[in-house]
Image (tube, rainbow, N blue to C red):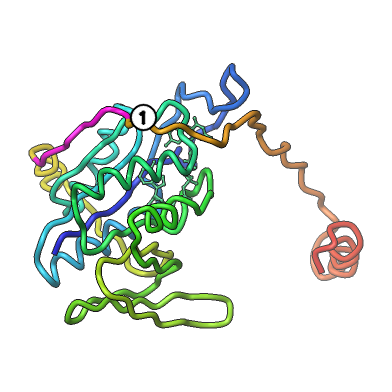
Amino acid sequence: MKIAVCVRRTPSTETKIGIGGDGRSIDPSGVSYILNPYDEFAIEEAVRTKEAHGGEVVAITVDGADASKDIKKALAMGVDTAIRIDPPADADSAAIAGALAEALRDVGPDIVFCGKMAVDEQDFQVPLRVATMLEMPAVTFVTKFEVNDGTARATAETELGQTVYESPLPVLVAVEKGINEPRKTGIKDIMAAKKKPLDERAAPAIAAKVAVTKLELPPEKQGGKIVGEGVDAVPELLRLLREEAKAL
Ligand SMILES: Cc1cc2nc3c(=O)[nH]c(=O)nc-3n(C[C@H](O)[C@H](O)[C@H](O)COP(=O)(O)OP(=O)(O)OC[C@H]3O[C@@H](n4cnc5c(N)ncnc54)[C@H](O)[C@@H]3O)c2cc1C
């Protein structure tokens, strides 16, 4: 079985984000990155599917050369090969999805795993755009996945409960938190990852249609307010939550 997983890095939650001089991108200096947490679930599911059915897993990222070290984490988790594609000059969701779709056409996967979203930009667009470009069925928010006799069965969580879908292969699956517990990697896995193939490709000529014109940080959080101590403070706390914060 050929399995692909689309992964991207994202600034670590411990990194202090600043706005770059152009006012429309983040200042990359001092930013440390981690793999997008939803993509770790996608990698784990891809590797588990390979372990159950045989085959190989390829991880694909559209990002600059710095991201090569981040995609090695996917290789350490059990992915077999990786492709890094330089991003198109202006990389909106359609351009990113276009670059991924182009590479995926070469791979010819039976299953494409994605995260449900990237935690920084939270666009939710890439997986469905890729599936549309590849004319593949897609299931999103997946918390349980299995393949039997060439049919994929995916369970999606919604606020109303669970929906169970069946789809022929090939299929794109965007995974939700809780689908699995991503494996920990050790020195041996990291060393093994260094020997696995990483194919680095030039940016495809795909033009973006949506441009970022301005980026602003959220307003500084206001300091906390101490309304009293012990149970005596509860009525005032409730009043403030109701009347000021409008949280009740
Ligand atoms: C290197 C780079 C340059 C960018 N430059 C611009 C720019 O010039 N103008 C602009 O408007 N925006 C730019 N962006 C932001 C970009 O448009 C968003 O990242 C994109 O719209 C996707 O949104 P998202 O990251 O929220 O992904 P979502 O759609 O929320 O991601 C869902 C899933 O799709 C997959 N995925 C998403 N992005 C990638 C990727 N890059 N590679 C592999 N898989 C992926 C992952 O599985 C992810 O979990 C850039 C992003 C990157 C990574």
Q: Nearer the viewer, residue 75 or 87?
A: 87
Location of residue 113 by image quarter: bottom left
Side of 246 where 205 appears, left or right: left
Task: Residue lying at the far top in this picture: please name it.
Answer: 21
Q: Which residue is painted at 32% across and 50% down in the image? A: 6
Q: Is residue 163 above or below residue 244?
A: below
Relative vertical location of residue 198 with respect to residue 6 in this rendering, above or below? above
Q: Amino acid at mark 1?
A: Ala
Q: Which residue is mark 1?
A: 205
Describe residue 152's horizontal placement relative to residue 29 as left or right.
Answer: left
Q: Which residues make up the magenta segment? A: 196-203
* Residue located at (89% from left, 69% from top): 235
The front one of 180 and 122 is 122
Which quadrant of the figure contains the N terminus?
A: bottom left
Q: Is mark 1 within 8 Å of ligand 1?
A: no
* Quadrant occupied by the C terminus: bottom right
Confirm whether the magenta stretch covers residue 64: no
Q: Nearer the viewer, residue 222 or 73?
A: 73
| Most foreground residue, 91 or 190 | 91
Q: Residue at x 8, y 38 (%)?
A: 195
Q: Residue at x 80, y 64 (%)?
A: 247
Against 7, residue 165 (above or below) is below
Q: Residues within 10 Å of mark 1 (few under 14, many from 20)?
A: few
Can you give x and y, in whole percent of width and height, for residue 234 in the image? 84, 68
How many marks the image carries: the answer is 1
Q: Quadrant of residue 207?
A: top left
Determine whether, in the image, residue 50 is placed left or right of residue 158: left
Residue 97 spot, x, y in % from top left: 40, 45
Question: Ligand 1 appears in which quadrant?
Answer: top left
- SS under mark 1: loop
Residue 220 x, y percent position in the rendering: 72, 37
Return the x and y of residue 81 as percentages of the image width and height. Answer: 15, 46
